[in-house]
Image: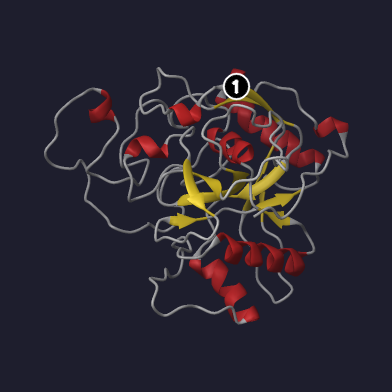
Amino acid sequence: MHTSTIPEPVNSALNSSKFVPELDENEIKALQQETAKKLNLPPYFADDLKIGGKGPELAIIPAGQYEMGSNRDEFGHSIEEYPQHYTRITHPFAIGRFTVTAEDFEKFREDTEWFLRNDLIWSEGQKPVINIRMADAALYLKWLSEQTGQHYRFPTESEWEYAARAGTNTAFHFGDEVTCKEVHFHSLFPYNEAKQKKRWFLPMCSPMATALDVGCKPPNNWGLHEVHGNVWEFTDTPWRDSHVNSNRDGSFDSSYISSAIVTKGGSWFDEAIHSRSASRKKRLYDEMDTNLGFRVVRDL
C-alpha cells in the first residue's frame, strides 16, 4: 500500500553521490552529522504530537550510493536477492530508530478509537506492535502525519536496506558473523555454526517465542536498532522474485503491480540467515502475524 511518491531533493547540497561503503565508521557517522546540520536538525529527533507527547524517535539518513542485494558467496544467499546492484538514494530521509512500539500505536488507538480485536495476541509497552495489517499501519502513518504536520510513510525496500546497512556491505551491519547477543533470531537455527557446517545440539542462547523490547540490541552506525531479527518489517515495495528491473534510485516502483509486498529484517521466529541485510520475504498486503511489524519514514 503506497502512501506517497518520493519528492525530489530541494537542496542540491544534500544530494550526495558518495559510495557509502567506501567510508570508514567515523566517516559514515560524520556524513549523518553533516546532513543533519544542513537540515537544521539533530541526527536523532522526534516530532511533537498535537495530542501531546512525541512521535517515534527518528534518525536522519544521508543520501548516497550503496550495493543492494547479495552475491552467491554470502552464506544464506537466495536467488531472490539477485542481482546485486548499485543503488543511489537521491535524497536524505528520516527513519524510525526502532520499529513502532505497542506504546506508540496505543496513542493512535486511543485518539482514533481504532478497533483492537480481543482474539489476537497484542504486544504491550516497548515491544514492537504486531498483528496489524499493512492497511492499519497506513492509518497510523496518516494519523501521525496529521498530528505532526510532517509527511510519514513506509520505507521502500531500497531505503530500508540502505539505512540498515549504514555503510556496510557484509551480511549483517556487525559483519559476516552474528550471535544472539547482537540479533534476536530463532535460537535453534544460528548463523555461524551453520556457516561452518558444525553440528549443534543445544541452542547457544535461551529460546524466546516472542519479540523483545526495542533497543535491546546494539545499533548500527546510524543509530538504528533491531534491523536484524526481532520482527519482520513492512516496506511499500511490490514483491518481485528478484531485483531484475527494480528501480535503482530507491524510489517507489509505481509501474509494477503485485498482490504482495517486500518485508525485511527477519524475526525471532526465523533462522538467522533471514535476518541478513539483503534478505527479503514475500507477504500479502492483508497479512498479519506475531512476528511482523513496521518502521516509519518521515520525508525531510
Dot 1: element:
strand
Quarter residue 205 falls in: top left
User: Total of numbered circles in the picture?
Assistant: 1
What colour scheme was applied to this rendering of the protein?
Answer: secondary structure
> Mark 1 = which residue?
85
Outermost residue toward the left in this view:
201
Residue 180 percent coordinates (x, y): 31, 42
Residue 115 percent coordinates (x, y): 54, 79
| Residue drawn at x 71%, y 47% as measured from the top left | 42
Residue 217 percent coordinates (x, y): 41, 46
Front one among 83 and 146 = 83
- In the rendered view, tell whether residue 211 sits above or below residue 250: below
| Residue drawn at x 64%, y 52% as measured from the top left | 154
Quarter residue 249 falls in: top right
Q: Is residue 38 left or right of residue 203?
A: right
Mark 1: give few (<14), some (14-19) or many (20+) Cα within 10 Å. some
Q: Is residue 179 left or right of residue 89?
A: left
Front one among 115 and 40 = 115
Quarter residue 122 falls in: bottom left
Residue 193 percent coordinates (x, y): 23, 29
| Residue drawn at x 63%, y 66% as measured from the top left | 140
- In the rendered view, tell whether residue 14 sits above or below residue 103: above
Q: Is residue 205 left or right of residue 24?
A: left
**Looking at the picture, which amino acid does disc 1 mark?**
His
Quadrant in which the N terminus is drawn: bottom right
